[in-house]
Amino acid sequence: MRKPMIAGNWKLHKTCSEALELVNELKNGVIDIRDVEIVVAPVYTTLSTVSAAIEGTNITLAAQNCYPEATGAFTGEVSPAMLADVGCRYVIIGHSERRQLLGESDEFINCKAHALAEADMGIILCIGETLEEREADQMLDILRRQVRLGLKGLDEAAMASLVIAYEPVWAIGTGKTATDEQAQEAHAFIRALIKEHYNQEIAAQTRILYGGSVKPGNVDALMTQPDVDGALVGGASLKAADFARIVAFEKQ
Ligand code: 13P
């Protein structure tokens, strides 16, 4: 059984005091939820504050990025161990905003995956096609490449704490959600790829989240799809009430 995960990617939002206000409100809103893994990914500067605020609660901390080295002359970067040190359990890698704005390659993302596995941290690997790629009928090739290169060399132990987030780039921050059928089709394809690279057991245990304009109004239908195991939420995770409602999704 795959435990659903609902993760909030706060992106470049919230000062320390704003983050504290948001997470305190969220804590109360999700206090009774036990059967969903609830994750928040604030900006680096607020991780310690949020970490202290969620201690002993049902909310888990994630970072939005990391650098694939433990220490060294890497100005401006943060290592997996440092993120673990402030209480992060997961790190998001491969987000399309980093792929597009910062030119991150599948190979570099794979280095981060290995560094995270070595530091015993959970990985949330984002993949997804752009609109041009979808319209050119390249979606499956893109997903195949991102899965193959992103997971390259990761052993079965690393896969145990790896989550994939399918985020079609055209659905991020646009208000355009993939239809339930589009999400299911991509998720089933990704699960088949994992089976191809590993085995049936790993494919069955790996959680695949959907991301891209997830809101209180569409989460129930998305979560009803058999291969959708959760959501990676951007905009709607910045409002405690909306995120709490998403966490409390109801399958239809
Ligand atoms: P939105 O929910 O704002 O579309 O963002 C999705 C996302 O990029 C989560 O990582």
Image (cartoon, rainbow, N blue to C red):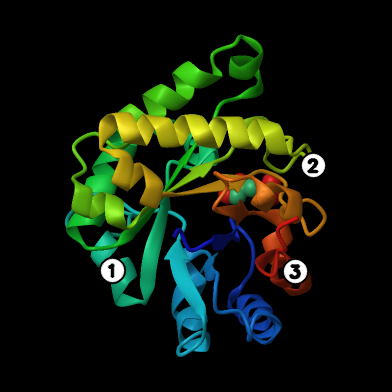
Q: CB at mark 2 closer than 8 A to ligand 1?
A: yes
The reply to whether callout 2 and callout 3 are in contact (CB within 8 Å) is no
Q: At 58% across and 16% down in the image, what residue appears? A: 133
Does dot 1 land on a helix, a strand or a loop?
helix
Asked if residue 6 lies left or right of residue 178, the reply is left
Q: Amino acid at mark 3?
A: Arg
Task: Name the quadrant containing residue 6.
Answer: bottom right
Q: Amino acid at mark 2?
A: Gly
Q: Say whether disc 2 or disc 3 marks the residue closer to the N-terminus.
A: 2
Mark closer to the observer (1, 3): 3
Q: Say whether disc 1 or disc 3 marks the residue closer to the N-terminus.
A: 1
Q: At 46% across and 71% down in the image, what residue appears? A: 61
Q: Amino acid at mark 1?
A: Met
Mark closer to the observer (2, 3): 3
Q: Which residue carries the number 1 mark?
A: 82
**Does residue 88 sit above or below 29 in this rendering?**
above
Does dot 3 land on a helix, a strand or a loop?
helix
**Does residue 114 sit above or below 133 in this rendering?**
below
Mark closer to the observer (1, 2): 2
Q: Which residue carries the number 2 mark?
A: 175
Quadrant location of the C terminus in the rendered image: bottom right
**Does residue 123 sit above or below 22 in this rendering?**
above
Residue occupying the far bottom of the picture:
56
Q: Which residue carries the number 3 mark?
A: 245
